[in-house]
Structure formats: structure tokens, C-alpha cells
Image (cartoon, grey):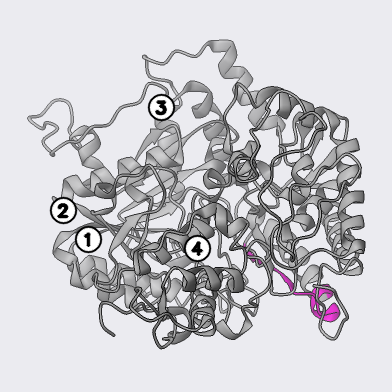
Amino acid sequence: MSNSESPLGISPAGVDKSLPGEITESLRSLFGELLGIPTDQVPVDVSFVELGSDSLLLVEATERIEDLLGIDVPFRDLLDTCSDITSLAAHLTAQGAVAAPVAASPAEEAAPPRALAPAAPPAGPSPAAPSPVETAEPLLQAPDQAGTTDLEREIIGLQLEVMRQQLDVLRGRRHQPTAPAPDRPAAAPPRTAEEAPAQAMGPYRPIEARRGRELTSGQLHHVKELITSIEARTEKSKKQAAHQRPVHADSRMSAGFHVLWKEIVHPIVADRAEGARFTDVDGNEYVDISMDFGVNLFGHNPPFIREAIQAQLDRGMPLAPYNTLVGQVAGLVSDLTGMSRTAFQNSGTEAVMVAVRAARTVTRRRKIVVFSGAYHGTFDGVLARRSTDPSKPPGTAVPLTRGTPAAMAQDVIVADFADSSAFDVIAAHSEDIAAVLVEPVQSRMPQIQPFAWLRELRDLTDRLGIALIFDEVITGFRLHAGGMQALSGVRADLAVYGKVIGGGMPIGVISGSERFMAPIDGGLWAYGDDSWPSAETTVFAGTFSKHPLAMAAAHAVLRRVKDESPQLHNELDARTERLQTTLNDFTRRAGIPLRVERAGSLFRFSFGRGFGYPDLFFHHLLNRGVYVWEGRNCYLSTAHTDDDVTFIARTVRAAVEEMAAAGFVQTEGGTSDE
């Protein structure tokens, strides 16, 4: 393929314009790759939002089109005048785009990553490594369908979902944050014949309808009733959101924004929380399957953590003098994970920054490798995506988001997760690579558990002198007491932890071998001899790292994990497996394009083509008393009971059946409007 030709089948503008049908097929190929579905299953008359495109995916689509064609399609146009394949193709054709023969997308050329069971652990693991669990079956059961969606777009999806003001400006009116807009006509772009007039729906005032498939009267009625119900249930939460918005900026305040349900786009404000449930400021009780983004392995406000924090509060919170628990917490991390030494920061993002900096100090190389679909926090140095410029070498990275300088991506290489092609990319750049940073099981694709691939990755990085960093901020101590190193039988050079270990307090943990931890403090030395901290050092500091309250909570968590494992994780995994099996059996029998995918007690709902407006599903759960945060990663805790699992399963089933009855779900052999 020539450099002037797009791998997705569109060439830069030439003298002659292509037929719209050729551009259409090229765009189907593009969006098929981005959405992770076969090209021939990408409809041309359904809006990108309805297909499941979030804001980050649409931003990536505009950047790819601009990179390949030099045609700027504003992000807002993909929400309005170019909201589906047909209208976008017509726009590009009018701008002079030329379609080249459509080539197979990478997603179609290669087999999707497979969900791999842990292979038999190598004989005679090193004494420092925890013994891998020996089992013929995967401990982290994966569903029989492995997801193929390229999830780079989700890495900071919430940060880019603040679309409210863009939509308001698009429709010719300014946002009024302090009060509802007066009931007067709003300026609007000329309406095409395909657009339906705006319809008032009780308290909900819809913005001008976008191009694409319109909702039926029955679906509009369904949405109206849901909005009315949620507004009545969460009146105080909504008032607090409206009151805060003029003075408080937070991506979660607009996460999941959609013109159809704008009136219920706001966070739920909690009043109190205990165990598996919390109560909001309106008095509604929810079974919580977000568990504070996976933090609460033991549920909300467990007495043993609360008592540990209170005991430390009674003794004060000095920051400059060392806390008595720091060494004990580091020792427990070493006992559980087999890592030699540990340092503390305040968040997973900071832990990643320190680990990368330490690896670069030791290896004296500058580049790092990350993988498509991974999430490593919000450090600019890891906010990168693969370049779509066909003239660039494989793995070339560009900034993932606006505001990240291009120079930050120059030292990043992006490879395919759980794919052998990554080994070729790493080998080709080995002399420049300081570290490979990997989520052993990606939180957004929990069904992919590539333990054999991880062992090959370890062998390769060992041979090439590259540091291997496991990012276990989400999975650490949740899936196994020894983390993914114990489950996979792979010993990393560095690992970063967070969330669970903090017991609800802010924390970031960096653990590793003496060689790679030495840059933090100069390395080991002793009293009474001539030793000194002789290792080359890098910058490491933090006012609130090792905070006394965080140390108290972490000490309590790690003691409980150590004392109660493996029974703790075995019982939690079994309960989550029961939920997964119950729901997947129901959706399979009913022909519903919905699956639950999991790794241990981490799980996600995965929607197939034919499940329209997935966000409505989560609003239904909320309305029925099951809480899922906007990022949609779900977790069970030890506080969840069998009765809670039954309630969750019953609620999911009721939500799906109600949406199917309204025509939002295309069942196999059914008659849906979707």
C-alpha cells in the first residue's frame, strides 16, 4: 500500500470525486475498526451515538479523517449534520475525498485476542516469587466470547464527555448554568426534511433531534416515563448538581450526556454508605456495584478499617515525622507480592509516573511501551494512541487527547495487547526502550486473560534488558492476594498498586526489585560499615505520601487480606461467577445481545449490535435501585450477599425486558424497532 493511500480505503482528495457509495464503504471500514465490529455489520443510517460511539471514539474518528484526508470534520458535526455514515460520506464527497480500494482493517486481518487460561507455572519458580496457583482451569473465568473492541477510546473517555456546552453552542444558544432557560424560542439551524420537530416530554425539553434513525412514539414515551421517574427520585441530587456547576468543574458532572436524557445527567449524591449499599440525599437506597471505582473490596465503611482510621486520628496526623505503620505496610506488601521493596505515593497516576521514571533511570533509555486498550491514569507521558499515518513505523504514538504536547508521545510506543505482533515492535526498538507498561488483565476487557502471552513478554524483556512494569492499580489484591504475578506466574521488575490497598483512602504504591527501586533512595546501605546510598537517584517526593490515615487503612486491609486468603477471594469469585452465569444464561436464552464479562470480582456489561442506547440500561438500573458509575466497570465486594446477587440479577432482567418491550433491544428472531 502506498503512503498516500489510507489503510481504511480513503485517499486524499484528487481531481475527480468518488461516488458516495465508495466513501460509504470506506467509512464503514473505519467505524467497524473503531467499534470492533465487522464492516458488513456497520449500518449506514444509524447515528454514531446509537452505535455505541462515545465522545473519545468520535474525536479519534475526526482525527483519523483529518490525518488521512486533510479534511477537518468538526467533532460537533458527528453529533448533528454528519451523525451517521450516509451523511458523513456525502459531506466528505462534497469536500473532494476520493475512495481507494477498501483494504481490510487490522481488526479484520488478524484474529482477535483470545481469553487465555493460565498455563502451567514454570517448574521451580524463583524463591522470591509467590508460587503460582496450580489449576487446570482458569481462576479468572472468561465468557466464551472474547471482546474485540479497540478500547483506546475509553482511556480518558470521561474527561472528553463534557459535551453540554458544545451541543448548546451548536444549536445556537448559550448555556445558562444557574437557572432553567426561559420558555422562549431558541435559535436553531435550518431543519432538514429528515429531522423531526422537537417534542416536549413533561419536564424534559429535547434539543433539536439529530439526523439518523428517530425514536418511535412508543420509545419516546418510554424515555419520558423513565426521565420523569428518575427526576422525582433524585430531585436533591439534581439540585446540588445545578448549584455546583457554576463553581465546580468535574468531568463526572456531564459524563454520559445525551440530548434525550439531559435532565437526568447528574451524579447521585450519597448521604451515607454501609456494606454493599448506600443511601442518597433523597433517601433512596442502592445496591452498589461500583464500589467506589473498585476500591471497596470489603464494602463501604467496614468496621475494621473505620476503627483503624479512628485510632490513628486519636493519635494525630503528623506528616513530616515518619509514621509507625509505614514499615509494617511495606513489609505486608512484600509478604503478599514477593516484591523486595515498596514506596508510597497518593494515587495510581503518581505511582505510574514514579515507576516509569525509575525504569528510565536504571536502563538509561527513554522510551516506554504501552498497549491498546490500557488505562494507566492521567499522566501526560502515557496518554498516547497509535498513529494512523501509514508512512509511520508500527507502534508510532501521537497524543491521545487535546492538551497533551506531541513531544510527550514521542517517547511512547503503542503495541497490540495480547498479540504476538507486540513482540516484533518491542524487538525493533529494544535499544531505546526503558520499560514495558502493561495491565496484565485490562480492566476494560476483563475477559482477555493472556497469561501465556505475559510469560513470553517477560522472557523477551529479560533478554533485551527492558523493565517490565505491571499496572495493578485496579486488579491488585482484588483478584488474588499476590496479585496478577501470583496468578500468571510472571515476576515483574516493578508493579504499581492503588484502590483496594487504601481501604478508601488516597494511595499509590510502587513495589519492585532492589535494582529498580534503588533510584528512589540511592539503594540499600547499613549502619556500622562503609556502605552508602550509591545508586543513581531520581526525583521522588510527596507531601502527603505515607499519610498516617492512608497507612492505617492500608495496614488494616493488608492484614485482613493476608489472614483470610485464599478463602476470601475464592468466595468472592464464586459469588461473582454466579451473577455472571445467571445473567448470561438469561440473555442467551432470550436472544438478548448482552453479556457479562469478568475477571474475578471485576465485571462489565458488554452490549452487542442490536442493543440500542446502552446508557438507558444503566439509568433503568439506577431507577430500580442498582448503582453503576459512569465508567461502567463493576465490582462485587465481600459485603455483597447472595440476596444482593439475586436482587442485581432480577433488576438487570427487568431493565432488559422493559427496554426490549419498548423496541430498544433487537432480540434474535424478535420484532424490534431498533
Q: Is residue 391 left or right of residue 19?
A: left
CB-based contact (under 8 Å), mark 4 and mark 2:
no
Regarding mark 2 in the picture, which secondary structure is present there?
loop
| Crowdedness near tag 1: few (<14), some (14–19) or many (≥20) residues, C-alpha within 10 Å | many
Give the mark, 3 or 4, whose residue is nearer the N terminus: 4
Report the magenta residues as a range.
Answer: 586-599
Instruction: Specify the amino acid type for callout 3.
Output: Ser
Q: Which residue is mark 2?
A: 365
Judged by depth in the image, the label closer to the viewer, 3 or 2, is: 2
The picture places residue 444, in percent across and down from the top left corner, at 56, 60
Given residues 248 and 340, the one toward you in this image is: 248
Q: Are marks 2 and 1 in contact (CB under 8 Å)?
A: yes
Q: CA distance from mark 3 to mark 1?
A: 28 Å
In this figure, which residue is indicated by the disc labeled 4? Answer: 441
Q: Is residue 359 left or right of residue 615?
A: left
Identity of the residue drawn at 82% across and 42% down? 205
User: Any mark on residue 466, and which?
Assistant: 1
Mark 3–mark 1 CB contact (< 8 Å): no
| Alpha-carbon span between mark 4 and mark 2 | 26 Å
* Residue indicated by mark 3: 545
Disc with the residue nearer the chain's start (2 vs 1): 2
Q: Is residue 262 magenta?
A: no
State how far apart marks 2 and 1 are (Cα): 9 Å
For the question of whether residue 437 can be seen, the reply is yes
| Three-letter amino acid code of the residue under disc 4 | Val
In-front residue for pair 202/430:
202
- Which quadrant holds the C terminus? bottom right
* Number of marks: 4
Drawn side of residue 499 relative to residue 388, left or right: right
Locate residue 341, reporting x and y percent. Answer: 32, 42
